């Protein structure tokens, strides 16, 4: 993430990374906080992210019904999703990945970080709120992206992978993947 970048953050939740992204891109940049409609429709569902947008000024909250119809004013440099890709995989993740591809500038980055469920494919997405990193690689590259890098810095080999991260008594095993849209 660079100063001046335009970022689309998918499902930012309480905005932890929204703050970091906003400060990193600076006043010259922009962060679109793409809030799912089901979350936004909860009482107070947008309070936290709206407070961040008001405080930082370069954050714009966008309520999303579906990514297949979402249009941003201009292409972005980065599409960012942390610990929510597994939720997208419970729906039309191909439409989301296709949207991300179309939303990015040529050469743009699609960053995915989530809770790992090695060897499970998509079977743990709704039950354990985890996903197999191989399934993510397959789905995202199918949309036309190239896997550029992966990191094991968030790995936790002590995680038994048999409980939801919310129920697991420690820090979950996570993976981080950086994809690039070809130029």
Image: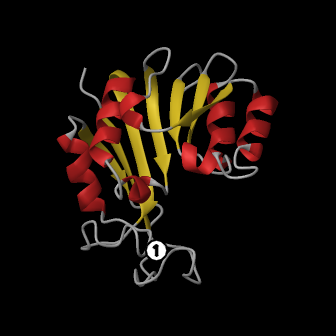
Residue identifier under label 1: 156
Identify the residue at image location x=75%, y=46%.
48
Q: Is residue 31 visible?
A: yes
**Residue 82 in the image, given as x and y percentages of width and height:** 50, 51
* Quarter of the view holding residue 167: bottom right
On screen, 62 above or below 38?
Answer: above
Q: 70 or 109, which is in the foreground?
A: 70
**Residue 78 in the image, given as x and y percentages of width and height:** 45, 31
Mark 1 closeness class: few <14, some 14–19, many ≥20 residues within 10 Å: some
Q: 41 or 67, which is in the foreground?
A: 41
**Mark 1: which secondary structure?**
loop
**Residue 80 in the image, given as x and y percentages of width and height:** 47, 40
Quarter of the picture containing the C terminus is top left
Query: How many numbered discs?
Result: 1
Identify the residue at image location x=32%, y=48%.
93
Q: Is residue 1 visible?
A: no
Identify the residue at image location x=44%, y=24%.
77
| Left or right side of 99 for 170 | right
């Amino acid at each position: 993430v660079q100063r001046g970048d335009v970022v689309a953050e998918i499902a930012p939740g309480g905005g932890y990374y929204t703050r970091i992204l906003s400060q990193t891109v600076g006043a010259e940049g922009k962060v679109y906080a793409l809030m799912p409609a089901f979350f936004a429709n909860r009482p107070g569902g947008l309070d936290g992210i709206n407070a961040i947008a008001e405080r930082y000024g370069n954050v714009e909250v966008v309520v999303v019904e579906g990514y297949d119809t979402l249009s941003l004013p201009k292409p972005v440099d980065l599409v960012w999703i942390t610990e929510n890709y597994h939720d997208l995989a419970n729906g039309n993740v191909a439409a989301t990945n296709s949207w991300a591809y179309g939303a990015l500038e040529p050469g743009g980055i699609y960053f995915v970080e989530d809770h790992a469920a090695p060897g499970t494919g998509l079977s743990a997405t709704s039950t354990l709120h985890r996903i197999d990193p191989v399934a993510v690689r397959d789905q995202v590259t199918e949309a036309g992206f190239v896997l550029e890098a992966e990191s094991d810095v968030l790995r936790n080999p002590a995680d038994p992978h048999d409980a939801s991260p919310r129920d697991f008594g420690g820090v979950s095993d996570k993976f981080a993947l950086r994809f690039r849209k070809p130029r």
